[in-house]
Image: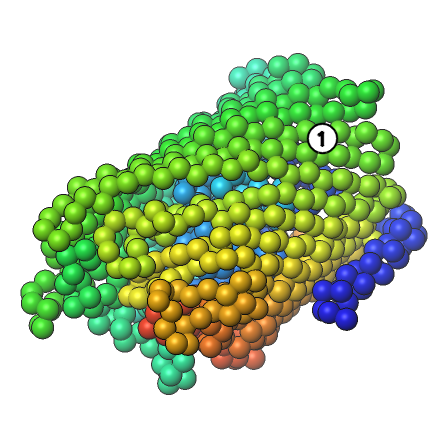
Amino acid sequence: MTTMKKTTLAVGCLLSAMPLAAQEQTAAPTLGEVTVSAPRGPAPVFDVAGSVDRVEGGDIRSDRLGVNLSEGLGQVPGLQIQNRQNYAQDLQLSIRGFGARSTFGVRGVRLYVDGIPATMPDGQGQVSNIDLGSIDRVEVLRGPFSALYGNSSGGVVQAFTETGDGPPALGLSVAGGSFGTSRVGAKVSGSSGAIDYVLSASHFSTGGYRDHSQAQRNIFNAKIGMALDDASRLTLIANGVNIHAQDPLGLTAAQYALNPRSADIASQYDTRKTVNQSQGGLLYERRINAANALRVMLYAGERKTVQYLALPPAAQASPTSAGGLVNLSRAYAGVDLRWTSKMKLVGRPLELVAGLGYDHMREHRTGYENYVGGIADPILGVQGQLRRNEINHIGNTDPYLQSSWAFADQWTLEAGVRRSQVRFDSHDRYIVDGNGDDSGSARYARLLPAASLRYAATRNLALYVSAGRGFETPTLNELSYRPDGLGGLNFALKPATNDNIEIGAKARLAGGLLTAALFETVTKNEIVTAANVGGRASFQNAGRTRRKGLELAWQHETDRHWRTLLAYTWIDARYSDSFCPVQPCPAGSLVAAGNRIPGIAAQTLFASFGWMPPEGWRVGAEVRAAGKVQANDLNTASAPGYGVTALFAGYVKQRGHWELSAFARVDNVFDKRYIGSVIVNEGNGRYFEPSPRRNWMVGASGVYRF
């Protein structure tokens, strides 16, 4: 019997036992009901016919440094999120295998911050502007209904800022730990009459676990709301982030074995990255009447990035080379119009959502040599001659429609469709001898349907099945370089399309929530790495891939504040067709059908147990484990699996107008040496990004409520 069949049988036995267990536990205390922002609007987690998790902002910050999303999202099954220990390359984030190939930033997964896309129209995103100090919650949606968010939505991660409430409050927080790491934050919040507000800022600095990995980040976040009248509300959102980070690059297996903290090549080229981003949004919500509501989101922003790569001067000699220094300036804006209507169909409740999303980005991309002087005796890590100059426009126009119909007392049918159209236009401004006009354009469009059927077997047990189709266009970074080494954008790349199916169950048991889901995704024209050298990657289309797996999660808290969180994921992600990165195919370069897709751990486990009262002492432990991860398509290099443990303790005290808290934490308690993430298909074999050995942190915060 195959593994998938065994798993299916086991889950089937589990689900068949749930109705009785659910009925037996109806009198037990239960977790508080929470809602999430499903594609059709707010809905209780238990009522969503799909895999969605909500993690509270307080839980993400509690007993942690409070800088990276990876600190608090381990409890979400199906999500693999790693701190690369490299703030020049952002977190490594994938959902059910989507986004695993990304060598920097986030792709294949849609990101939103207070409704503003952190994923650009081409599908490339970043989480660096999420302010954990003022975050209210993070929601993670997986499965077929992710497709209703448009291009590159293998999953959806949404972060929401708190809403100010009550008398003014001033909060200050500090934290520090190993490797010269520190964070200082301040927040002001409250409400007065029709106005509510949250203003937050923080400074983060680290010397870095590895050599040449120093980083600094300043972030500001503001959310101001106004009740215009009893039926309408206006919310203003503003956000800014500034990052200066050295890039330690990856290590070969030999370099890792000799010294996992080394970064010799990075130091030689002084690889580094600077990011400056600012954006703002305006959200208008109006309840027209009891059955109809309008929502309008407008946003605009700009992001400037300068990055020095480890590209040898000799490799930049070709007239078609774009150099070893990337300079990007991006201006983006968009609007989302949404109408919600509640009515009846044959006497049963029907909810309809219709909308239109429009996003546009203008990118000015320049490239320079990363040295001055001659090739034989260069001065590295400085801006040299101009080698690339182009203006790129990317936009999408996406109408969408979704419905939810409770056609019987225990049955709900949901269906939706989105037509996503993405446009790329490139205008070459660097035309010299040997480098002609590389201007061009491309259009991608797909109809993305999704549907689900939910059966509420009892008040505490729900079963569902869902299916959908998604697609993923190449990003501008993936279009930037051609596998043949010639100049111009790689417009030969096609979008990948995928068909998804999921069956799942949710049960309230013994005061907790148990969720289980089986899924399978088949992708055509998978976008894969053709070459990845010197921090510069080119891409091509492979054939079909298949991702299938199982997710299990358990959340439980007793009335005496003992909390248990468990999340387990098994995923089998493989190439269904063989392919070769280059043509003609050299010996030993064929990627065989059946090879594992790199960057994905076949199994992951998160377990947390602690005593977490709202006031007084608290203590707990966490375990994170992951299986072996392939580092390249050939499956000739891999990072071994690992398991690490963390211990933490804290104290919370309410006294008059003050709320005080402090914590201490030790990660990797047993001092394991392990590789936390890999750079997929790195051409020099520098695949491995080591994680810290045993390390510590302490922190304290205080809030004064006037």
State which quarter of the image contains the N terminus: bottom right
Looking at the image, is 164 positioned above or below residue 3?
above
Q: Where, by quadrant of the figure, is residue 300 drawn?
A: top left
Residue extending farthest left: 373
Q: Residues within 10 Å of mark 1 (few under 14, many from 20)?
A: many
Question: Where does residue 553 sit, x and y in percent of width and height?
Answer: 71, 57
Does any portion of residue 470 appear in the rendered image?
Answer: yes
Residue 608 picture location, percent across and down = 66, 64
Residue under pointer 1: 404
Query: Which residue sits at x=71%, y=34%?
Result: 414
Q: Relative to 452, does residue 578 appear above or below in the rendering?
A: below
Residue 458 vs 663, above or below: the answer is: above
- Towards the viewer: 492 or 503: 492
Q: How is the image coloured?
A: rainbow
| Viewer-side residue, 632 vs 588 | 588
Give the total of numbered labels: 1
Q: Please, what secondary structure does the residue beneath circle 1 have?
A: strand
> x and y percent of residue 342 in the render?
70, 21
Residue under the point 72% across and 54% down:
517
606 relative to 123 in the view: left or right: right
Residue 331 appears anywhere in the view = no
**Which sits in the foreground, 517 or 699?**
517
Q: Looking at the picture, how far across and down is residue 205, in whole percent? A: 36, 59
Taking depth in this image into account, of 418 and 127 the one nearest to the observer is 418
Snapshot quadrant of residue 221: top left
Q: Residue furthest bottom?
A: 258
- Disc 1 residue type (three-letter): Ser
Name the residue furthest front.
Answer: 584
Residue at 52% x, 44% y is 471
Q: Residue at position x 71%, y 56% from top?
A: 518
